[in-house]
Amino acid sequence: MDGLEQWTNQLQQWVHEAETWVHQIPASQLYAALCALFLTTAFLLLIHLKRFYVYNILGNGICQKKNLFFLLIFLSCLIIAVRLFKRTQSNTIVLAGLSASGKTVLFYQLRDGSSHQGTVTSMDPNEGSFVLHSESTKKGKIKPVHVVDVPGHSRLRPKLDEYLPQAAGLVFVVDAVEFLSNCRAAAEYLYDILTKASVVKRKIPLLILCNKTDKVTAHTKEFIRKQLEKEIDKLRASRTTVSAADIANEFTLGVTGEAFVFSHCHNKVTVAEASGLTGEISQVEQFIREHVKP
């Protein structure tokens, strides 16, 4: 029994590694590979079906079992292709950002339409699959969203890497009230995200969400965008001396000789506003449904 359990665990690990590898492949390349597999298998099946009918016309049915074998291969390939295609249509949205930016309140607003009277700093990811609260009264079948709230503490940020390979979109939450005091730290975290291979290769769309905009002292999204671009531009210059090991794992940002702007990123970056406490989250809901179709 121990040997069987060990083999089962090893098999599950291989399956998980295979799924992670598949999700890191750009969608266009994966679709092309699936199409090639499907067309090749279909072509081989047609050849053998032709032989099958020829043999039947001649009164020789000895190839029936052989053709049945190829038919089973074709159906198996088709099932695998469909399952892979479905898995590429991820429904995962990842919430990231510094501690106290309001990620967890946003998570509860998306799920329950309630702020839960505010929250404390999370030490573990909050995650769940649900229909957005604003869609709960809609008729018909609506695709649920898998939302993951990753803790913002610097020691817990590596957990983000566990979810990025499955992410359909990434929401980077910024505290619009305390922005200036946290601008440098937010820019560093955002820089790390935008240069991750899993983000760049899959071109994961990213929304910079300026939270707490219901407060009078909140900064505008345009101000926050420009300040983040300036800080990231400074980081580009300061990180040119990274080690060879770091270079192998990172992508560079921006265009050489030009000041950094988010439009230079490999993936699409947009900016929006929200207020987790008051429930004004329509812009983030729109972003979610752009990348996780209902």
Image (cartoon, rainbow, N blue to C red):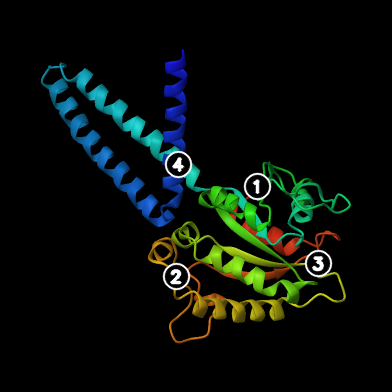
Quote the CA–CA distance across marks 4 and 3: 37 Å
Q: Are marks 3 and 2 in contact (CB under 8 Å)?
A: no
186 or 206, nearer to the observer:
186
Quote the CA–CA distance across marks 1 and 3: 23 Å
Q: Earlier in the sequence, mark 4 or mark 3?
A: 4
Helix or strand or loop: what does disc 4 sit on? helix
Helix or strand or loop: what does disc 2 sit on? loop
Task: Identify the image quadrant of residue 246.
Answer: bottom left
Q: Which amino acid does label 4 sit on?
A: Glu
Quote the CA–CA distance across marks 3 and 2: 35 Å
Q: Mark 1 points at which residue?
A: 145
Q: Which amino acid does label 1 sit on?
A: Val
Measuring 32% from the left and 42% from the top, which residue is drawn there?
A: 38
Which disc number belongs to residue 212? 3
Measuring 49% from the left and 42% from the top, which residue is drawn there?
A: 86
Q: Mark 4 points at which residue?
A: 19
Quote the CA–CA distance across marks 1 and 2: 38 Å
Vertical side of 54 occupied by 107: above or below: below
Q: Earlier in the sequence, mark 3 or mark 2?
A: 3
